[in-house]
Image: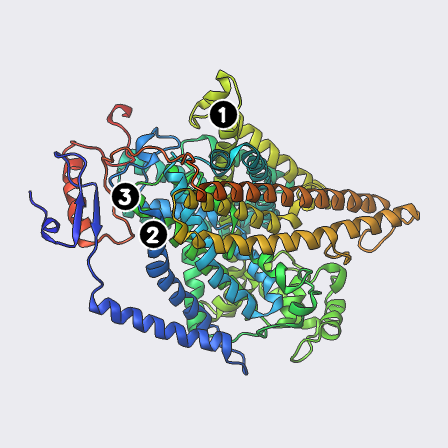
């Protein structure tokens, strides 16, 4: 049958097999007049919003303008800047098979519907970062955070995610550390492998700690989140065996079951047996997480990991959309000023340090995150159906995460400033009681507006069903409190305030759990890649990430590594992962520098000098920020910032025979601070040095390439594709037509649906 699209001069159809329908479409149709007018209108609206957000000073701006400025910018960036990167650097070809198609094995590699994969990818990258970082950054005012989250994602974060997905997809889904080893030579490669792996383990443990803190002593959260696991298993089996390719059906079923899990958790938590069974201590929750991480890493990806991530994406995007609607209806005003005094003086209660560089380190994931490069070179390229889908998944997924960060920032900024600092100032400053906290907030911070009374602080806690809201640091409680403030105004009034607060806490735990499971699997791939570099025939077997004994061994090592520091942190308030938590932000941004270096080297090796600024600008900026921050953390004379300065003060106190010093109330606590600052300071130096070695190696390779040395580009040779998939969420008319041709062949059994089980499996 002749396709209508074949007659259109602007459309080129890609065929690899004369007997099969086309495997790809190149659509060069010009933009329709209606679309042009639409983009002009979006541009004008965005311009008005940005003017109000960034330039107009005076009364407190309406939060709605922040949502509009963000969305208009994202639409433009996705349509024009991401398209530029796609056309000038990536050159995706849908007649080339992706690793998922070439190496399909039903456990790690398999072509996955673009909507499910977007869900998996977004869930895996959007961990605690976009929720927690912006909340803490709000202490500097709304403007610096807003500017960095939106501009940073367009030119840095989404660029990194998209380009790393591209280089990994063209290299059979290899992990970031291994690509660095292949492209940068031995020294740079080994520095990258070590740095990436150690940072990865710290990141997973930090994220796991946030989940433990959210779920400990919370029967509602534990029950609801435990229930998402059987739901995911059912979805995985449904999509692979019962109804292959029916994504919309299972999405609907999944959402209904998810809502049931959330609501029933509330009922269970109110019964006696429910509280007995599901109120778990921190140690128990930690062990459960370790077991879950191991299972998610070893089981086939279609069974647990991809469907659970897809499921939680509904919850994530749904909740954030709900919050956006709430803001558009309630139209709260910003209570934070554009810039606070803490931005210039660097003595803020939520975190110490000046606007540059620490704002950029604190916000981390909403604008640029090295962790994403690990997902873009870990699970996602092994599941990608077609190369054309990389822009939607890599660039689009990161824009979605940035929107989450903007919503978190707004949520923190619409709270009364007294309440915001009551939640985020540490107990050492607030004293922990309503009376001492009110005194501190009214007299020490110079906040505008009426003073706050102790009874108001108590009432605020009672309204959300908590004992106290004083010094609930870490960002997550503030976000939950802010969400309940916005949502109860629109949905359900005062009586539902406590429901929204607990819903938000649970939402955060679900949000972060997906990063732990995907992260464990990615770290497993990375470890088996690294072992594969060693001499010997057994080591070579590790190169295949689906070799079962290798998968088991690597998963166990990875889980043991992050599980150990997690358990140390849970049992010792000053040890284990708590020691490493302050390194999280810097380590994450240093990881981005490694990823951008590898991308930069590949772009230069391919002779694309004219476009090298696209990864180059974010790389240079990221290096300036991370190296300044590392320098201050190592050499600063301010004990709240410099690790070694704090170290020497506590060593001195111990030598003077003191048993109490500053925050440490016992001799053991003084020893713990001495030990922790030593580990933190040493790791800060090691990470910074490793990254500088990687960047130096990258510069050397770039210079050699420009001088005309023939350097091997490790891209794998193209294999012709035999499957089809639309490029975006909504298929174009030509794509619809081709898809229906394929659907006929799938229905009569000539070909099987991508990612469906082989007939022999039944």
Near mark 2 (Cα within 10 A), the count class, few <14, some 14-19 or many ≥20, is few
The mark nearer the N terminus, 3 or 1, is 3
Near mark 3 (Cα within 10 A), the count class, few <14, some 14-19 or many ≥20, is some
- Res 120 → quadrant: top left
Toward the top, the furthest residue is: 537
The image shows residue 585 at horizontal and vertical percentages of 60, 51
The image shows residue 722 at horizontal and vertical percentages of 22, 35
Residue at left 59%, top 70%? 141
Toward the right, the furthest residue is: 656
The image shows residue 187 at horizontal and vertical percentages of 57, 34
Circle 1 is placed at which residue position?
532
Q: Quadrant of the N terminus?
A: top left
Relative vertical location of residue 741 with respect to residue 4 in this rendering, above or below: above
Nearest to viewer (mark 3 / mark 2):
2
Residue at left 49%, top 24%? 550
Circle 2 is placed at which residue position?
88
Relative vertical location of residue 564 with respect to residue 669 in this rendering, above or below: above
Q: CA distance from mark 2 to mark 1?
A: 34 Å
The mark nearer the N terminus, 3 or 2, is 2
Residue at left 48%, top 72%? 63
Q: Quadrant of the C terminus?
A: top left
| In-image side of 193 versus 159 (left or right) | right
Circle 3 is placed at which residue position?
93
- Res 192 → quadrant: top right
């Amino acid at each position: 049958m002749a396709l209508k699209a074949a007659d259109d001069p602007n459309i080129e159809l890609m065929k690899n097999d004369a007997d099969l329908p086309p495997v790809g479409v190149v659509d060069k149709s010009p933009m329709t007049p209606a679309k042009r007018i639409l983009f002009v209108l979006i541009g004008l609206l965005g311009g008005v919003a940005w003017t109000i957000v960034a330039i107009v000073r005076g009364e407190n701006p309406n939060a709605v303008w922040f949502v509009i400025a963000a969305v208009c910018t994202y639409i433009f960036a996705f349509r024009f800047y991401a398209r530029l990167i796609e056309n000038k650097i990536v050159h995706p070809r849908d007649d080339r098979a992706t690793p998922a198609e070439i190496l399909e094995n039903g456990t790690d590699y398999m072509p996955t519907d673009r909507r499910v994969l977007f869900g998996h990818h977004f869930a895996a990258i959007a961990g605690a970062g976009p929720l927690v970082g912006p909340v803490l950054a709000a202490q500097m005012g709304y403007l610096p955070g807003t500017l960095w989250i939106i501009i940073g994602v367009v030119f840095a974060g989404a660029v990194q995610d998209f380009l790393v997905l591209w280089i990994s997809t063209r290299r059979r889904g290899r992990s970031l550390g291994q690509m660095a080893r292949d492209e940068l030579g031995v020294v740079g490669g080994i520095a990258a492998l070590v740095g990436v792996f150690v940072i990865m383990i710290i990141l997973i443990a930090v994220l796991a700690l946030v989940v433990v803190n959210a779920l400990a002593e919370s029967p509602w959260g534990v029950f609801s989140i435990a229930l998402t696991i059987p739901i995911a298993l059912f979805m995985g089996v449904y999509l692979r065996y019962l109804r292959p390719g029916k994504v919309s059906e299972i999405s609907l079923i999944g959402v209904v079951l998810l809502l049931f899990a959330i609501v029933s958790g509330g009922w269970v938590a109110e019964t006696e047996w429910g509280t007995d069974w599901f109120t778990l201590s921190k140690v128990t929750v930690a062990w459960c997480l370790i077991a879950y991480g191991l299972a998610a890493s070893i089981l086939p990806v279609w069974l647990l990991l991809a469907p659970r991530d897809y499921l939680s994406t509904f919850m994530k995007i749904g909740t954030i959309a709900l919050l956006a609607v709430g803001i558009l209806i309630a139209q709260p005003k910003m209570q934070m000023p554009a810039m606070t005094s803490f931005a210039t003086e660097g003595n803020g209660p939520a975190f110490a340090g000046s606007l540059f560089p620490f704002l950029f380190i604190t916000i981390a994931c909403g604008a640029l995150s090295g962790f994403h490069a690990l997902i873009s070179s870990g699970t996602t390229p092994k599941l990608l159906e077609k190369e054309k889908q990389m822009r939607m998944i890599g660039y689009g997924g990161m824009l979605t995460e940035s929107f989450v960060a903007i919503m978190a920032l707004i949520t923190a900024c619409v709270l009364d400033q007294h309440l915001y600092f009551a939640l985020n100032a540490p107990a050492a400053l607030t004293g922990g009681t309503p009376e001492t906290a009110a005194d501190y907030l009214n007299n020490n911070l110079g906040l505008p507006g009426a003073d706050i009374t102790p009874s108001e602080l108590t009432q605020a806690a009672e309204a959300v069903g908590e004992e106290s809201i004083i010094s609930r640091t870490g960002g997550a409680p503030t976000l939950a409190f802010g969400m309940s403030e916005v949502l109860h105004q629109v949905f359900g009034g005062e009586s539902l305030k406590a429901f929204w607060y607990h819903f938000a806490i649970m939402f955060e735990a679900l949000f972060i759990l997906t990063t732990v499971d995907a992260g464990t699997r990615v770290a497993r791939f990375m470890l088996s890649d690294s072992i594969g570099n060693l001499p010997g025939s057994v080591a070579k077997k590790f190169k295949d990430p689906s070799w079962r004994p290798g998968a088991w061994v690597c998963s166990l090592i990875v889980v043991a590594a992050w599980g150990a520091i997690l358990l140390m942190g849970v049992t010792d308030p000053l040890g284990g992962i708590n020691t490493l938590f302050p390194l999280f932000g810097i380590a994450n941004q240093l990881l981005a520098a490694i990823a951008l270096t590898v991308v930069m080297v590949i772009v230069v090796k391919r002779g694309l000098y004219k476009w090298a600024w696209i990864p180059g600008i974010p790389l240079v900026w990221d290096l300036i920020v991370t190296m300044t921050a590392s320098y201050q953390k190592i050499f600063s004379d301010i004990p709240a910032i410099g690790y070694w300065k704090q170290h020497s003060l506590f060593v001195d106190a111990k030598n003077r025979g003191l048993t109490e010093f500053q925050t440490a109330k016992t001799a053991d606590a003084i020893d713990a601070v001495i030990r922790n600052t030593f580990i933190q300071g040493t790791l800060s130096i090691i990470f910074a040095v490793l990254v500088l070695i990687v960047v130096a190696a990258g510069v050397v390779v770039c210079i050699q390439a420009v001088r005309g040395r023939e350097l091997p580009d490790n891209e794998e040779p193209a294999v012709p594709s035999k499957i089809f998939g639309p490029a975006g969420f909504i298929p174009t008319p030509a794509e619809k037509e081709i898809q229906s041709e394929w659907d006929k062949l799938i229905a009569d059994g000539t070909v099987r649906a991508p990612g469906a089980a082989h007939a022999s499996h039944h």
